[in-house]
Amino acid sequence: MSRLALVRDPRFLQHITPETHPESPQRLVAIDNAIARLALDHDLKQLTPRSASEEEISLIHTADYIEHLYDDTERARKTDGLVQLDADTFVSAETYSTAKLAAGAGLTGVDAVAAGPVDRAFVAVRPPGHHALVDKAMGFCLFNNIAVAVRYAQKSAGFKKVFVIDWDVHHGNGTQWAFYDDPTVFFISFQQYPFWPYDSGWYLEDGKGEGKGSNMNIPLPAGTGDRGYLHAFDQLVKPVCLEFAPDLIMVSAGYDAHRDDPLGQQRITTAGFAMLTQRVADLASATGAKVVVFLEGGYNVKSLSDSATATMRVLNAASDPELGAIHASYLMPFAAGDAQHITDDRNVEMVNDRVREVRKHFSKYWQELR
Ligand SMILES: [Zn+2]
């Protein structure tokens, strides 16, 4: 029996970007093709998403912004062209309905894991969401799909504590600010640093008020690679997640930290993403939390589709012999001199130092880090 629901829909192709834009409909076509090639269709419980209502979207976004996006879409429709919102974010004739469907797909995923029998969901959507601010589109993102789903999960699906892991190469600034003062949502974000967006993502942004200590940024140098990410996961994500004890884990799964991605320089391999996913699955088993994974970035369609389907396979099977063999090759300790996935020793030291720094800073909030 499948334990993973896959939420996808051809209507996500209807949001159009300029011809050379990295966030293209081809990204989802490639994922569909990889699913078919691996015959995953038969293994997963496939769900068609519903649209989020304006009321549900307003759990995160202002009514004014929602209305603006509607108006911009109408303008695009009338001119039969694209409306540009910022340097790289565009609206086409079907953007508003597509963005509503992308936000709704997360709610479909939440409902699926809440009701069972699946306990994990992969939401294969575009446009992505984690940069979208409460009152503004940003960085290819229109509605913050994962943030809307967090609030919906708490309000309508009975979940209390949500642990959000963002491993997209860019900082999930929209999600961070949405829950910055909320102790019921722990936001933890890996990012290449310094990198776009340049005004957020440092580890001293650790929440405010009641939410102090429940926002953790893991800013990592370019070239961190698989072992650096896994090291940071084991030293930071795992202990705080176990102590936070969520009933729902959500992942902003961008695949632009892949070594073949044209935008990022983080050098994660497809196997590395499988291993990160395995760690998420292990945390879900340890805490009893359900899991909902959202597609965010990832702009090399080959590495994106390989890595996204690797995530699906790991989430669908607790123990896949093939993945177990890959796992074994990752059990070696992370140390200087290890050149397989890390470019040079200087990088290893930088990653180790940064992880230590972040751990020390957060040890005042979390016992498991002391
Ligand atoms: Zn990204």
Image (cartoon, grey):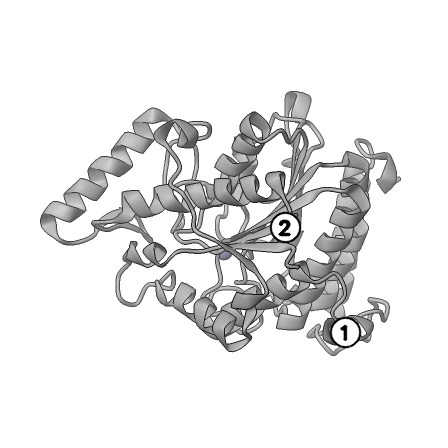
In the visual, does 3 lie left or right of 261?
right
Image position of 222 (left or right of 51): right
At label 1, the amino acid type is Pro
Indicate the quadrant containing the C terminus: top left, top right, bottom left or bottom right. Answer: top right
Provide the residue designation for mark 2: 120
Residue type, label 2: Arg
Q: Position of residue 212 (x, y in %)?
A: 69, 27
Q: Residue 321's mark?
A: 1
Locate the N terminus by quadrant: bottom right
| Res 199 visible | no
Question: What residue is drawn where x is 68% and y is 75%?
Answer: 343
Quadrant of residue 100 within the rendered picture: top left
Among the two numbered marks 2 and 1 on one chain, the one whose residue lies closer to the N terminus: 2
Label 2 and label 1: CA atoms lie apart by 20 Å
Of 154 and 207, nearer the camera is 154
Please state if 333 lies on the left or on the right of 193 as rendered. right
Q: Residue at x 17, y 47 (%)?
A: 76
